[in-house]
Image (tube, rainbow, N blue to C red):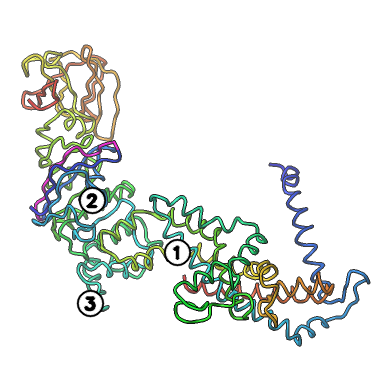
Amino acid sequence: MTLSVEGLRVAHGAHEVLHGVDLTVASDELLVVLGPSGAGKSTLLRAVAGLTPISAGRVTIRDRDVTRLRPGQRNVAMVFQSYALFPHPPTAETTRSAPSGRAMPRAERADRARRPAATVGCGHLLGRRPGQLSGGERQRVALARALVREPDVFLLDEPLSNLDAELRVEMRAELKALHARVGGATLHVTHDQVEALVLGDRIAVLRDGRIEQVGTPDEIWHAPATTFVARFIGSPPMNLLPSDGPLSGFAPPGMLIGVRPGALRLSDQGAPARVERIEVVGEDAHIYLRLGEHSVVARVPSAQKPASDETHVTVRDGDVHVFDPSTGKRA
Amino acid sequence: MSRRQLGFMLAPYAVGMVALVLLPAAATLMLAFADYDLVQPPQWTGAGNFTELAGDGIFRTALVNSLVFAAVAVPLRLLIALGLALLLHRRARGVGTARTAAALPTAVPEVAYGLLWLWLFNPLYGPINQLLRVGGENGLTALGRTPPQWLTDPTDARAAIIIMSLFTVGESFLVLLAARLVLPPEVYELAAVEDATGWDVFRRITLPLIAPVLGLLLVRDTILSFQVSFVPALVVTDGGPPPYATTYLSLFVYRNAFEYLRYGYAAAATMVMLVLTVAAVILQWRLLRRWR
């Protein structure tokens, strides 16, 4: 394990933000920490970097206990949402941050800066000042800067959140390709589920300072461990109904069943439902339905949206997730 | 907002500007080319005042004194204000008190401040020389030297005026403190992650980010430097020790105008001061723009 975090607790005054987090990141693995704002994602990242003091726990990087070390001694590289570029020209900036060497010949430094800069496609930007760069360019420079240091762990704090939607998709793909090329243990924090599903080798879902589930994007999607994970990932979120409600027969009574909107089929038979509202989102239509006393959402191709207010809903056995309503955990 | 409203609201400032700045400036400009002693009407002398200034040894001494004071005091004052701001920008125990202490001397009325230093600088029983004599014998310092004759030796007196000016940096300190507090914390965190040295952080982050404010304060302090030396020289050293060791341009103007009643001559000296100030500001502005 390149990075391992055990029993990490962080408190801001009397308010505990992280209640004992355990995580591991293998070498060349990209682990995405996903969660709503206020879940403690950035705090976790900052604690790993050593920027936020911890109240309990242990951080190990390459079998080296770094819990008590200064940020600068942990050999990590960080990319901030705001990029945090130094006001000096990027060349000087990327070159200065060479891993071990303050005393490195100027030419070698410049050479060191050129390679990662070329890797992330910002070689032509090296002479410019941060003020002259666009958001995407700044992000590239910040990444190049992280690469120069050849760190043990990359820490990315919402690196794509400041970019506009189009650029975000583009940079997301580039980030994925970059990680495939360069490797390196990476902890990537985001609140964007799509970003997590696309980028992550594994995803850790964080909620209120606790890890809800760690797993591959497949596991997170197909076998969410808790109702929170089930509803946080997927848009519109998963429908949760009592097992003895309108869609019965999938689990013993007293349980919760979860069905993703895309798994609900509208047909002539099955549970009768009333259409309350339809949102057409391009090729998809989100159908808001009333099933007895419960509200559910179905996602169907726009072309198949129901013509009348009355319809029926069916679901296949394999598409049903079962949860324990008292703990919220997968049954 | 209508033009009439705008006019009403600007009127007090316009009146103040005209009465307190423009009219005196115009009067000074005219008087610079005349002889005037408050009793007889002004008499035009053309450039006479200026030719006299050029040959006046006291004026030349005052000019050099002022320039030396500005050259030494302005950078030192700025450095101290910057040092204090960088030292006291963090939240820590006692920082509030320290900030107040750093800003407080600036709030003391100038004459009171001067009288206080008159006591502090007293060569015999003043606390400064008493401290300097600690560990020494026969009234000498621990190194066996005579302690400074603050107000009677020309060089020591000039140093004394500069030392006095170093404690009234409250405004610059507050401006720099505010400027430092709004700098983005992530940049400093990134520097911490990259194990940058304190000097690197200062040179590569703080200095470039704070430079515009620093430049502004440099220009402002230079303009002000012709004034901050006035009250100390008047109250503490009285322009001396002889001959005119701490007579600065401002004191020279004051003496000629209000003691010798040579208003025209004083006005001409004021004009020279103005030209010097403008030249210094333009020079600094150019240097700063080239550096950025």
Q: Is B86 situated above or below B144? A: above
Residue A234 coordinates in the image, percent (x, y)? 20, 34
Determine the secondary structure under disc 3. helix
Q: Which mark is residue B83?
A: 1
CA separation in Å, label 3 and label 2: 31 Å
Chain under disc 2: A
Q: Which mark is residue A108?
A: 3
Q: Which mark is residue A165?
A: none
- Amino acid on which the number 2 mark rests in the picture: Arg
Horizontal side of A82 relative to A310 (left or right) equals: right
Which of label 2 and label 1 is nearer to you? Answer: 1
Chain under disc 1: B
Kindly indicate whether the residue at mark 3 contacts the one at mark 1 (C-beta within 8 angstroms).
Answer: no
Of A290 and A218, which appears nearest the observer?
Answer: A218
Marks counted in the figure total 3
Mark 3 surroundings within 10 Å by alpha-carbon count, few (fewer than 14), some (14 through 19), many (20 or more): few
In the figure, residue B220 lies in which quadrant?
A: bottom right
CA separation in Å, label 1 and label 3: 35 Å
Q: Which residues are magenta?
A: A14-27
Kindly indicate whether the residue at mark 2 contacts the one at mark 3 (C-beta within 8 angstroms).
Answer: no
Horizontal side of A149 relative to B163 (left or right) equals: left
CA separation in Å, label 2 and label 1: 43 Å
Horizontal side of B63 relative to A243 (left or right) equals: right
Residue for point 29% across, 53% down: A80
Task: Name the residue carrying label 2.
Answer: A172
The numbered mark, 3 or 2, whose residue comes first in the sequence reads 3
Residue B171 coordinates in the image, percent (x, y)? 56, 58
